[in-house]
Image (cartoon, rainbow, N blue to C red):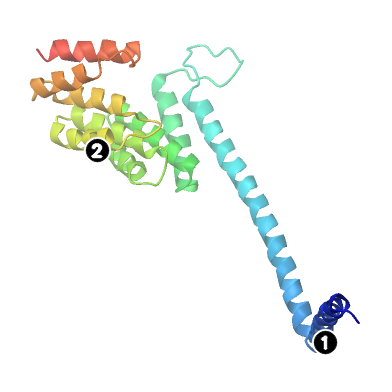
């Protein structure tokens, strides 16, 4: 037998030995092998079912939020035209909207849809002079790990500014300037900050506004910055 043939024979024997060992192990541990195979299959099935449940639950949350949005966006008409949901008074619409958004926020608390509903609810409460409730809801969303957190911080800052709590509003907006998000850019936060401090610190407000007047900025930002700079003179 040549060296090449001997090498092949050794490799073949080693492979056969490994197969024999594996067969012997399965034969002697048949119950355990079956058990772990079943467990693996069950885990895979549970994973698929869990993903399916997640998608179903997400769809339910989205439908609930959309239903609340239909109420929020319904027109106010003294004489309903029968073509869709309407309200005869703004007060009736606001009450129904707060109820619908509140239900979604409570039922789906902690989800993106729940946070969106709670943010919208806070804004509606603020516009209806329900400042305590609005502050509480803005704070909850602002502290959440959600894309709506930055929007809630803006709402909270505007609420504080409207109440004369400029120091608190300034702190929130400075945080957003330092940590912008996809929904609240550094430029937007800077403009809001300049607007809040233009009466108490006009020099800084003007500097902030002027810093945004560059060619790469949008025309709307330039106009707003120019107006703030003018007001701060």
Which residue is at 17% across, 30% downward? Answer: 163
Quarter of the image for the C terminus: give it: top left
Residue 175 numbered mark, or none: 2
| 125 vs 17, nearest the viewer | 17
Q: Position of residue 172 (x, y in %)?
A: 23, 37
Q: Position of residue 154 (x, y in %)?
A: 30, 32
- Does residue 128 show up? no
Q: Position of residue 60 (x, y in %)?
A: 60, 42
Describe residue 15's horizontal placement relative to residue 224 as left or right. right
Quarter of the image for the N terminus: give it: bottom right
Residue that extends furthest to the bottom in the rendered view of this protein: 28
Which residue is at 39% across, 23% downward? Answer: 91
Tell me if residue 21 comes above or below residue 111 in the rendering: below
Which residue is at 42% across, 43% downward? Answer: 146
Residue 117 appears in which quarter of the rendering? top left
Describe residue 226's horizontal placement relative to residue 43 as left or right. left
- Does residue 86 show up? yes
- What kind of element bears circle 2? helix
Q: Position of residue 195 (x, y in %)?
A: 19, 21
> Which mark's residue is nearer the viewer, 1 or 2?
1
Describe residue 60's horizontal placement relative to residue 32 as left or right. left
Residue 24 numbered mark, or none: 1
Q: Residues within 10 Å of mark 1 (few under 14, many from 20)?
A: few
């Amino acid at each position: 037998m040549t060296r090449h043939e001997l090498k092949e024979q050794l490799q073949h024997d080693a492979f056969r030995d490994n197969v024999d060992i594996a067969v012997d192990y399965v034969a002697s541990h048949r119950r355990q092998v079956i058990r772990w195979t079943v467990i693996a299959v069950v885990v895979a099935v549970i994973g698929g079912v869990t993903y399916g449940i997640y998608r179903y639950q997400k769809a339910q949350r989205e439908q609930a939020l959309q239903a609340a949005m239909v109420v929020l966006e319904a027109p106010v008409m003294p004489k309903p035209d029968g073509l869709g949901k309407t309200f005869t008074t703004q007060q009736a619409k606001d009450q129904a909207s707060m109820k619908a958004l509140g239900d979604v926020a409570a039922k789906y608390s902690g989800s993106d849809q729940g946070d969106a509903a709670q943010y919208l609810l806070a804004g509606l409460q603020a516009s209806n002079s329900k400042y305590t409730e609005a502050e509480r809801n803005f704070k909850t969303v602002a502290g959440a790990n959600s894309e709506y957190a930055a929007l809630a911080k803006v709402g909270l800052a505007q609420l504080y500014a409207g109440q004369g709590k400029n120091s608190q509003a300034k702190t929130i907006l400075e945080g957003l300037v330092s940590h912008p998000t996809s929904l609240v850019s550094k430029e937007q936060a800077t403009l809001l900050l300049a607007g809040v401090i233009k009466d108490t610190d006009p020099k800084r407000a003007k500097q902030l506004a002027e810093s945004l007047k560059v060619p790469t900025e949008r025309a709307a930002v330039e106009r707003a910055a120019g107006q703030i700079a003018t007001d701060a003179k």
